[in-house]
Image (cartoon, rainbow, N blue to C red):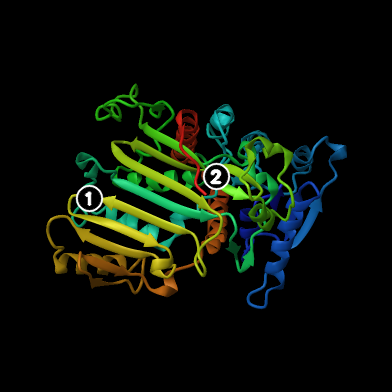
Amino acid sequence: MHTLLFHEPGHFHAALLLRTQNPRIDRTIHVYATPGRDLDRFTELVAGFNSRPVEPTDWNLRLHDDPEAHGDLLAQLIAEQRGNLVVVAGRNEPKLATIRRLHQAGFAVLADKPWIVGPAGLPDLETVTAGPPLAMDIMTGRHDVVNRLCRRIVADEDLFGRLAAADRGRPDLEFGSVHHLCKVVDGRPLTRPPWYYDVTVQGDGMVDIHSHLVDQAQWLVDALHPGSAGAGPDQVGVRAERDDLHTRDDPGNPERPAIVIERAERWSTLVPLADFTESTGLERFPAAVADQVSDHGSGPVLALACNGLIDYRLRRVRVRQRTVWRIRPPEGGSDLHSFAARGTNCTLVVDQGPETGGRPDVRLIPTGRRLRPDLLARHLERWQEDVPGLASEQTDDGHRLLVPPTMATPHEAAFPVVLDDVLDRVEQQDWSSRAAATIRSRYRLLATAQQVAVHAPPMS
């Protein structure tokens, strides 16, 4: 039985880890947090899980908010040692320093992304990924059924071919996402903390959603070349280049970086005060963001630098990531996602948005020739073990893969699965140098992209 500790759970992802009851976790959860809005929102979400009519949870939150005996709440948590696994999911700016203190005190840590808001956190990153105990970031994408299917397709040279689109001047892997500041999570309007709108605390458009997308790229590349996306510290380098890159990511030469950034851009979303108020409950922009606020005639507007594009090469695989934040989704809509993997035999395309009814639309588009029906049929049968009930239908340009609706789960449902995976690792004392190197290279990439990013015009 594990006792779970939470330190300053200011992001709603912290509560989502408790969305379902886990028999391996003691029902008493110890929360070390400063009284205020962040703590109130966390306790409200957990209370909602406890009181829902269907499969209610039974968590007992025990709050610790008196740091006088130890100087600060983190020191109190470390001194009392009430559990062995600490969840850190709040303000991003102090996150890596917090993880480092917990790591050095011997606690396993599960921390929400991103771990970094800029290069200043890199020394702490090196410390917490250099050796045990376990420190993992919350990456839900690897547990999504469509993402698992895509990984199997891209790794199948017989069906998909090889990633070769870069030879044609296009990315091998291309990710796109559109998220919304005003949204509904687990059936309720989401209240964001005011600091979420301060990029010096939350991080800007180069580090937040991009951490998920880099993780997906690393996962896909690792399926093609096991171990290459999480190379050891002596083999991984991240630097910005703008010349011919074809020979600069040779994995056999440790002097050449495994990750090379070609382009990085960031731009702002304009957030009117009324929308900020709807999102946070505050009637004024905080003083901390005053230098990003201007009057656009109808009232004050915040220029939130939350959008970003990164072009880079990961072990010769060319990747493009583009993330955008809008104010709110269209009526009845949600966040939008797109993905393309371009192979020599076919292109794999995934779209999810209003035009797909909010469900992933997965298509295989042959490159220059039709996919043999018998070849696709054999693969469908093989994929049944991971996606029971998977079927296909022919389209004008190829084939659509039909994932059964029962296999699709909401994003919120992945968080308890991530927690279960971390519990497995804690019980098996499974600290992986390869996994740690993957985390390290991920945040090195983002910190460097932030340093070299150019600013583009804002979007409204």
User: Is residue 59 positioned above or below 78 on the image?
Assistant: below
Read off the residue under disc 1.
Answer: 343
Answer with left or right where residue 223 lies relative to residue 407: left
Tell me the quarter of the image containing the N terminus. bottom right
Q: Residue at x 67, y 55 (%)?
A: 274
Give residue 113's position: percent from left, percent from top: 56, 45
Q: Nearer the viewer, residue 356 or 315?
A: 356
Instruction: Look at the picture and state if 336 lies above or below 437.
Output: below
Q: Residue at x 66, y 52 (%)?
A: 276
> Is residue 389 placed above or below 100 in the rendered structure?
below
Residue 424 in the image: x percent, y percent?
54, 54
**Relative to 152, is 78 above or below?**
above
Which residue is most to the top? 255
- Residue, far front: 297
Q: Is residue 390 visible?
A: yes
Q: Nearer the viewer, residue 149 or 291?
A: 291
Q: At which x and y percent is residue 135?
A: 57, 42
Q: Which amino acid type is marked by label 1?
A: Gly
- Which of pointers 2 and 1 lies earlier in the amino acid sequence? 2
Total labels drawn: 2
Q: Residues within 10 Å of mark 2 (few under 14, many from 20)?
A: many
Q: Secondary structure at mark 1?
A: loop
Q: Mark on residue 136?
A: 2
* Observer-nearest of 100 and 23: 100
Q: Can you see residue 2? A: no
- Does the residue at mark 2 contact the one at mark 1 (Cβ under 8 Å)? no
Residue at (57% x, 60% y) in the render = 416
Question: What is the number of the mark on residue 19?
Answer: none
Q: Type of residue at label 2?
A: Met
Q: Is residue 267 left or right of residue 94?
A: left
Q: Position of residue 13 (x, y in %)?
A: 61, 54
